[in-house]
Amino acid sequence: MADAVTMDVASPAAPSDGLTLGRRLAIFVVLLVSEFLYGWAWNTVDVLRPYIRETLHLSLIQAGAMYSAQGAGALTGAVVIGQLADRFGRRLMLSLLIFGYGAMLLLGAMIQNYPELMAQRFLLGLFMGASFPVGVGIYVNLFAATVRGRLAAMLNVCFSGAIMSLGIAMSMIGSQDWRVLLWIGGVPPLFLAFVVLLLIPARSVVDRFHVESGKLPISELFHVGVRRQTLLLALMTGLNFFGYEAYSGWLTTYLTGDRGLSTAVAGNLVAWQFAGNIVGGFVWGYAADRFGRRFNALGFLIAATMIAIYLAVPTDLWVLRIVGLIYGGSLCASVIWGPWLAELYPPHLRSTAASIFNWGRIISFFAPLVTAKLANVFGLRVAMASASLAFAIAAVIWLCQRETFGRGSSEVG
């Protein structure tokens, strides 16, 4: 039983399943568009935080709790809907998720108070949290393992491009019209959801694997042979989310507050950081396909170093741009996590296994609250520096995990 759980027994070739190359490419293009819209929707919690805080008259801790509510929804969605996708079909679930986060983003333009904000962010997270594992479960069955790192890099480009676009739009529109950005990101998913139903064939291997079992898919991730692996992966992803929120989540607030920069300049610096993601995504995607999945842990060590430098250097815009660029490029070393998590478990568990990425939000729930308290006592710079330690520990855990690709691995699919 342990071998059945730990080995991925899919064929190394791309599954045909009657799908032409053109059809598979079209499905992947839809996933790329979905990833852009997902990136736009998710990162409104960080990029628009100062303006939502001002409009709704929130305290620093209340503003930070936005992320906790969204993260709680994401964890719930990843655990529950990821399993439903493996059991009943990824096609229907993906369509539902895309429509759902579009609708919830539009709802965000209508909120009037803090309780409504918390409810809206939880529901938004619920749909977005499952988007990642369901999408991974689809594209790892579209193409061979030898290109999955680069496929993940292309999706990362769309996610990073969305954040860049959101930062640039923020600097152009200004704080008084921030709700317009929710409308821009919320309408397109309502239409894309129907395209998913048209392109992905029902009951195909891309849609789901047919496994006769009375067990919940998630229970298989805690089988005695892989329980320790599953828990360590969840801790690793949790440290990633904590580090990201502790640093990037407060970046706009830090730049406009502690650094005293204008909204336009802050938006420009945010865009530079995620421009690094675009380049870095391809670099780390190729590296994972060439040197193995664990090689990318080096990126987290670089990111930890760049955080310390960014918080220590004087306010020289070009220095901040370059350091931010390197940080952004290094951070996206985790671009391979989707395919890697899917490869660590059997094919019929791929969406459920990829949902481990969002389990780490249990730890990240506390990131805004902990960092807000640290900021109140020691200052925002010290609070953000905790991200450096989180990324370093995550890198060590990553290096201790099983390799699934390349020489000495057990990956055959």
Image (cartoon, helix red, strand yellow):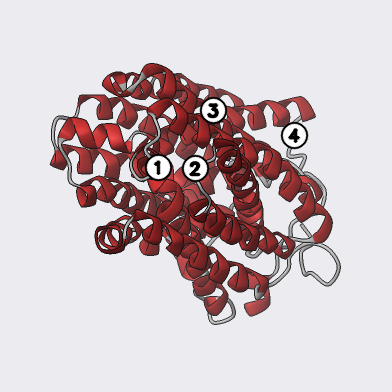
Position of residue 137 measured from the top left corner of the image (x, y, whole percent): 59, 48
Q: Toward the viewer: 408 or 118?
A: 118
Number of residue marks:
4
Tell me which label, 1 or 3, sits earlier in the chain.
Answer: 3
Please give the label number shown on residue 196.
3
- Specify the amino acid type for callout 1: Arg
Residue 297 in sight from this viewpoint: yes
How far apart are the two marked residues, 1 and 4, measured between alpha carbons?
A: 57 Å
Q: Secondary structure at mark 4?
A: loop
Q: Where does the image place residue 368, in percent across and percent down from the top left?
A: 32, 55
Disc 3 marks which amino acid?
Val
Question: Which amino acid type is marked by label 4?
Answer: Gly
Q: Which residue is mark 1?
A: 259
The residue lying furthest to the right in this view is 407
Label 1 to label 3: alpha-carbon separation = 44 Å
Could you classify mark 1 by the number of other residues whose Cα lies within 10 Å: few (under 14), some (14-19), or many (20 or more)? few
Residue 89 in view here: no
Which residue is located at x 65 percent, y 59 percent? 302
Which residue, given by chain and number where applicable, does mark 2 sit on?
315
Q: Is residue 95 left or right of residue 116?
A: right
243 displayed left or right of 278 = left
Which residue is rendered at x = 30% and y = 52% of the image?
A: 68
Q: Nearer the viewer, residue 323 or 387?
A: 323
Answer whether labels 2 and 1 touch (C-beta < 8 Å).
yes
> Quick one: SS at disc 1?
loop
Check whether the beta carbons of the residues at disc 3 and disc 2 lie within 8 A of each other.
Answer: no
Separation of marks 4 and 2 at Cα, in angstroms? 57 Å
Tell me the residue that label 4 is attached to: 18
